[in-house]
Image (cartoon, grey):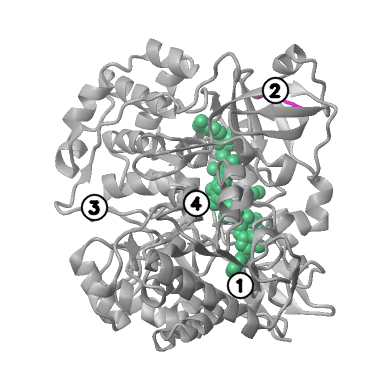
């Protein structure tokens, strides 16, 4: 019996699992990997169910009548599917120029695939049009970390360090539902008396076990952070020596936070002054301490500045680079970290290099064997690209790999309209997602247990995804599909569909960059249970902990950045009197295209529920389990009510794992953060009412 040690297909924790061949397919068990240590959540336990699921796409699909999207999808050969794609690419580029063909990628793709997709768009399509769903995920925290620390590695320390911290401030993070096995580290700390302060408008499972729950109005986390720093300065809790020796720019921040006095911050956020003072005192005195943010703080039209405000606080307290201390963002998707390093971002080349940096262009062009002048310039960010699909100057032919944007993009009905306006939509997926259902060509792709490659987890640990079984006969990996397509475009020689070969090229392309993988090999990953980047040489041990000796900025110092509170782009008014915030439930994953097909998960979480405070519900005559209609300026959606005394009475919460009438993204605000281009998923204005309409599912 060959046992395959690999990792869960879903979130960034990348729990280790073991697959053993068994009739009908495989047996899945948790492995003793350093991150999960034998733990798995319900999604991981049931992941193998999808390998031979009856809904699985097993052949390419094309429209019965090419060019008519109202005609049904029918099975096709790869030849026919690729021909249709190539014909549309040629026609589009001839008529509208190279940038009219583009790609939308995903943070679930292996490093090899994300790298190849970025290269494919620049080298085979010679187009600037590529971005990916990570823009909707941790782009705000990434932008802030790059500004402050010169590098964006979600956690700059192994997850196990969290157990050693005496104080942890968790801002807009709910790991108890989003990464259940990670709770063993939080729980270990709590058992030793660590104080955890959870900042969330809802009393979550994470908040319930914490020392303190702060319940701000959504979108006021920046004011909260500036308020905490204000108190730290007033009470002489800041680390003057650290600020002097290891940072620049503090004076401007000191001036900026001057006006965030506690009474004012209490009014802005709703968090009592006493809790503000207690939080700073714990962070400063009960060390080591950590500040961790996740999507609750970051997915706002001021998300970058919000993450920045927490970085400012962490730096002022002298936490960053000290043992079991510092700032981190909890990355979300399986390869959310690696997926943001190797070039599927509009402005990026492999190794976290910048596409507009001449030295970076020269280095990568050399590895790719092209003239640097051939490389396009940076393109548009995810929502900016989607917003212009099918318009003058916009993308006309779009390839979507590993994202279900018809469900997960903000202002989803508009995005669906734009997808319909394309000349050709190509979607590669495992199942017919809501996005694939709109496509002209659908391509079936291999699943996690059928492919080789690497993923980089939330700690910056590069790990291996291993194949336990072959994909079904007519199913190809995304690497193979991209190579096949490149061949037809006359650029096949530049591409490989052999993961190891791609990884070796990625290592060379990333060498000398910020995310340097040069010293990482498949063999080392296996022998060392993952290797932490940066790892510039094969005899380099890798870097589990960053910043002990300095920061990768030109002067080696971390940078303070002055940031000010701004109201969310859309605030409640008479017509839309409540704040809608959105997020996750434990049993479902993302757009739900995978987990909604797993029987055990759907039984325990069959439909989305909107969480309402009982007082708010009463005011609208809503009882638990009633159907509720939510309306925003952009659309409406239906949810069954769940009364929850632990949520703010002015705020409602709904998950985004469903489409159609239950799509919360029909409501969300696509206002973008001006630095990261992150949409305001976590705050828009809505009206609520009880309804007899059920909506479809
Ligand atoms: N079960 C499950 N697990 C997942 C995923 C999944 O879809 N399902 N997705 C994975 C991915 S890609 C990601 S990015 C991570 C996300 O992981 P998290 O960021 O932990 O998850 P969210 O539920 O999006 O948001 C966290 C919390 O933010 C709160 N919140 C909302 N608005 C605000 C606000 O304005 N301020 C503050 N302070 N808090 C606010 C919400 O109430 C929520 O409890 O999870 C990963 N893990
Ligand atoms: N309202 C609201 N909206 C949100 C969020 C929120 O908190 N609130 N969170 C945002 C965040 S953080 C994220 S990360 C996004 C996620 O949203 P999406 O990008 O839609 O994420 P998934 O549902 O994981 O989509 C991945 C798709 O790729 C398929 N797939 C899986 N593996 C592969 C592969 O290897 N190759 C190919 N070709 N396909 C594959 C899956 O079946 C699935 O259909 O949603 C964002 N949208
Ligand atoms: S926590 Fe994430 S990686 Fe671990 S089993 Fe659950 S979904 Fe998979
Ligand atoms: Mo995410």
CA distance separating discs 1 and 3: 33 Å
Q: Are marks 2 and 3 in contact (CB under 8 Å)?
A: no
Which numbered circle lies on residue 386?
4
Secondary structure of residue under mark 3: loop
Q: Is the magenta stretch mostly helix, strand or loop?
A: loop
The answer to which of marks 2 and 3 sits earlier in the sequence is 3
Q: What element carries label 1?
A: strand
Ligand 1 neighbours mark 3 (CB distance < 8 Å): no
Earlier in the chain: of badge 1 and badge 3, it is 1
Check the picture and name the quadrant holding the C terminus. top right
Give the numbered dot on residue 551: 3
Calculate the distance from the C-alpha at mark 2 to the C-alpha at mark 3.
48 Å
Q: Which residue occupies 64% across, 34% down?
A: 635
Q: Quadrant of the N terminus?
A: bottom right
Residue denoted by label 2 = 688
| 191 shown above or below 488 | above
**N-term mark: 4 or 3:** 4
Please give the residue where the numbered disc 1 appears in the rendered image: 6
Of circles 4 and 2, which is in front?
4
C-alpha distance separating marks 1 and 4? 34 Å
123 left or right of 3 in image: left
Frontmost of labels 4 and 3 is: 4
Q: How crowded is mark 4: few (under 14 residues within 10 Å), some or many (20 or more)?
A: many
- In the picture, measured across the screen, residue 241 lies left or right of residue 40, that is left
């Amino acid at each position: 019996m060959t046992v395959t040690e690999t990792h869960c297909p879903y979130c960034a924790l990348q729990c280790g699992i073991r697959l053993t061949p068994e009739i009908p397919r495989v047996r899945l068990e948790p492995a003793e990997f350093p991150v999960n240590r034998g733990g798995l959540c319900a999604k991981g336990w049931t992941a193998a169910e999808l390998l031979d699921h009856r809904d699985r796409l097993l052949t390419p699909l094309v429209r019965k009548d090419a060019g008519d999207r109202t005609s049904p999808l029918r099975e096709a050969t790869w030849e026919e599917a690729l021909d249709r794609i190539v014909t549309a690419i040629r026609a589009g580029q001839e008529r509208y120029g190279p940038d009219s063909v583009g790609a939308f990628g995903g943070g679930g793709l292996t490093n090899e695939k994300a790298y190849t997709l970025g290269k494919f768009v620049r080298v085979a399509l010679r187009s600037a049009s590529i971005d990916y769903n990570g823009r909707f995920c941790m782009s705000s925290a990434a932008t802030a970390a790059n500004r402050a620390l010169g590098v964006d590695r979600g956690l700059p320390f192994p997850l196990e360090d969290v157990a050693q911290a005496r104080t942890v401030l968790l801002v807009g993070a709910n790991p108890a539902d989003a990464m259940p096995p990670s709770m063993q580290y939080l729980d270990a700390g709590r058992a030793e008396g660590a104080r955890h302060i959870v900042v969330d408008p809802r009393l979550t499972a994470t908040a319930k076990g914490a020392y303190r729950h702060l319940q701000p109005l959504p979108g006021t986390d920046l004011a909260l952070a500036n308020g905490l720093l204000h108190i730290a300065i007033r009470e002489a809790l800041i680390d003057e020596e650290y600020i002097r020796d290891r940072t620049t720019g503090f004076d401007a921040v000191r001036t900026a936070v001057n006006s965030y006095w506690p009474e004012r911050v209490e009014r802005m956020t709703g968090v009592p002054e006493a809790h503000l003072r207690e939080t700073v005192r714990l962070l400063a005195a009960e060390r080591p301490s950590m500040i961790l943010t996740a999507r609750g703080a970051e997915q706002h039209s001021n998300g970058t500045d919000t993450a920045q405000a927490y970085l400012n606080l962490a730096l002022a307290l002298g936490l960053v680079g000290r043992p079991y201390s510092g700032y981190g963002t909890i990355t979300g998707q399986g390869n959310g970290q690696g997926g943001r390093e190797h070039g599927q971002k509009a402005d990026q080349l492999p190794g976290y290099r910048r596409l507009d940096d001449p030295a970076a262009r020269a280095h990568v062009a050399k590895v790719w064997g092209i003239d640097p002048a051939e490389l396009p310039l940076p393109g548009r960010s995810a929502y900016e690209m989607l917003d212009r699909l099918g318009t003058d100057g916009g993308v006309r032919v779009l390839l979507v790999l590993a994202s279900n944007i018809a469900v997960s993009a903000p202002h989803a009905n508009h995005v669906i309209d734009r997808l319909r306006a394309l000349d050709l939509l190509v979607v590669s997926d495992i199942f017919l997602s809501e996005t694939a259902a709109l496509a002209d060509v659908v391509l079936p792709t291999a699943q996690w247990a059928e492919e080789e490659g690497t993923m980089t987890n939330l700690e910056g640990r590069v790990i291996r995804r291993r194949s336990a079984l072959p994909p079904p006969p007519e199913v190809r990996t995304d690497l193979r599909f991209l190579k096949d397509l490149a061949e037809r475009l006359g650029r096949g020689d530049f591409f490989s569909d052999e993961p190891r070969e791609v990884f070796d090229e990625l290592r060379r392309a990333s060498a000398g960059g910020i995310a340097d993988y040069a010293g990482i090999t498949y063999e080392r990953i296996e022998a060392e249970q993952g290797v932490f980047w940066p790892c510039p040489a094969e005899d380099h041990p890798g870097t589990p902990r960053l910043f002990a000796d300095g920061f990768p900025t030109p002067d080696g110092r971390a940078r303070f950045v002055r940031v000010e509170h701004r109201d969310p782009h859309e605030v409640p008014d008479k017509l839309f009197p409540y704040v809608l915030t959105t997020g996750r439930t434990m049993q479902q994953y993302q757009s739900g295209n995978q987990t909604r097909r797993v029987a055990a998960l759907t039984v325990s979480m069959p439909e989305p529920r909107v969480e309402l405070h009982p007082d708010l519900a009463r005011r609208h005559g809503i009882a638990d389990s009633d159907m509720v209609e939510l309306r925003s300026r952009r659309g409406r959606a239906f949810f069954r009510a769940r009364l929850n005394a632990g949520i703010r009475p002015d705020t409602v919460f709904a998950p985004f794992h469903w489409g159609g009438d239950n799509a919360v993204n029909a409501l969300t605000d696509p206002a973008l953060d001006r630095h990261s281009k992150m949409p305001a998923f976590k705050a828009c204005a809505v009206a609520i009412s009880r309804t007899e309409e059920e909506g479809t599912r």
